[in-house]
Image: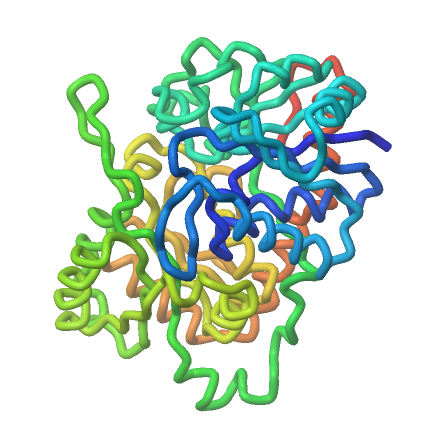
Amino acid sequence: MARIVVCGYMIRHPVAGNLLAYFHYVLGLHNLGHEVLYLEESGWFQSCYNPINHNYNDAPQVGLQAVQALINTYGVNATVCYVNRDTGTVYGADWQEIKQMLKTADLLLNIGGVCWLPEFLLCKHRVLIDMDPFFTQIGTFAAEGRNEYHAYFSYGVNIGQPNCGIPSDGIKWLPTVPPVVPEIWKTPILTPEDSGEERANLPFTTIANWNAYGGVTYKGEHYGQKDQEFMRLLELPSYCSQKLELALAGKDAEIAEVAKSLQAAGWLIRDGKEISASLSTYITYLTSSRGEFSVAKQAYVKTRSGWFSDRSVCYLAAGRPVILQDTGFSDWLPTGQGVLVFSCLQEAVGCIERVNTNYQAHCQAAGELAEQFFSYKVVLPRLLETVLTTTRTHLSPFPV
């Protein structure tokens, strides 16, 4: 088994969905028997978000407590450290201990590319995992230390394919997908009310940051966020009887204005910040949904990236079907049962009708897809094999 340093964005942004995007790696590696050090650095001035008062500051204590609570809840044997790169203050260990951990580690996984310390170079194998295809490749993320990795992976599974519009930046991006630990999400796929009126009345949901960090212009073209794609489907509730609910986060004034338009069109709106403030609330929200209905960031769609959501894999692991806007993931993931794909309003209506016609079968298929394609038992061993033990130049990212 390996000693692995995992770098991420949990401490600075300890909201439930973000925590889980990284914690699935930490817990998955632990479950596979590896020794894990979770290491995060401050990145920029006042980078630490407090989900209680919604303020930003330089104090990592709230995030450290949230990560440690996850570690304790799931019995993970992992060290958690945080470094303020400006002041040199270290939490969870002393600086010499961290350098020794890096020097003796078998692998450093920099997930998302929002951490970089020169001391990472002490680690003999360094891997970047791009969670945000297109934006990473054009330099929005992971620009610092970009050339200091031994291997590069991306959730943009289609990068390098003829129909994918993401520039490679001169790098060979190997395909990977967000891992999930299904045990976190194990609920009965069908409860007594699932085929009855109570389950039928539950909404399809999703949790979304409306405009995230905004769109960009690249080579004269605009590449946007989810807001533009949701507005294309504004009138969807009027075309179906299914309840559709969005838990939205973002700038309060903007969300308040957007919510008025969405509610007038028939969407149900919830406070995404409230749902994401605690892990238990977040898990309950997903598992109490009929399934997920969501769009993707416009940039993912426009480039046909092949991206699949780290939130959607949680719905699948809970046995909840997902209806998603196609980013090109239909090129590699079986769709039609458990995962349904649309590109326009009319196709979205058809997907909702198909799920509701045979809901039980779609729930069953959702859980099976989670196990086959996204379980940490599938995703992480293949990633580690590529980095640590294989010299093959091409490795199919998914089981056949």
Q: Residue 141 at what x, y percent from top left?
A: 41, 26
Q: Which residue is located at x 46 percent, y 29 percent?
A: 43
Q: Is residue 311 visible?
A: no
Which quadrant: the N terminus? top right
Q: Is 345 displayed left or right of 85 in the figure?
A: left
Q: Residue 346 at what x, y percent from top left?
A: 24, 59
The image quadrant of residue 25 is top right
Question: Does residue 362 sit above or below 110 in this rendering?
Answer: below
Which quadrant: the C terminus? top right
Q: Which residue is located at x 16 percent, y 60 percent?
A: 258
Residues 229 and 34: in front is 34
Question: Does residue 399 sit above or below 150 in this rendering?
Answer: below
Question: Does residue 55 sit above or below 160 in this rendering?
Answer: below
Q: Is 347 displayed left or right of 384 in the figure?
A: left
Q: Is residue 222 visible?
A: yes
The image quadrant of residue 4 is top right
Q: Is 92 displayed left or right of 48 in the figure?
A: right
Q: Which residue is located at x 52 percent, y 61 percent?
A: 315
Q: Residue 64 at what x, y percent from top left?
A: 59, 48
Q: How many marks?
A: 0
Q: Is 321 displayed left or right of 386 in the figure?
A: left
Q: Which residue is located at x 44 percent, y 69 percent?
A: 355
What colour scheme does the image use?
A: rainbow
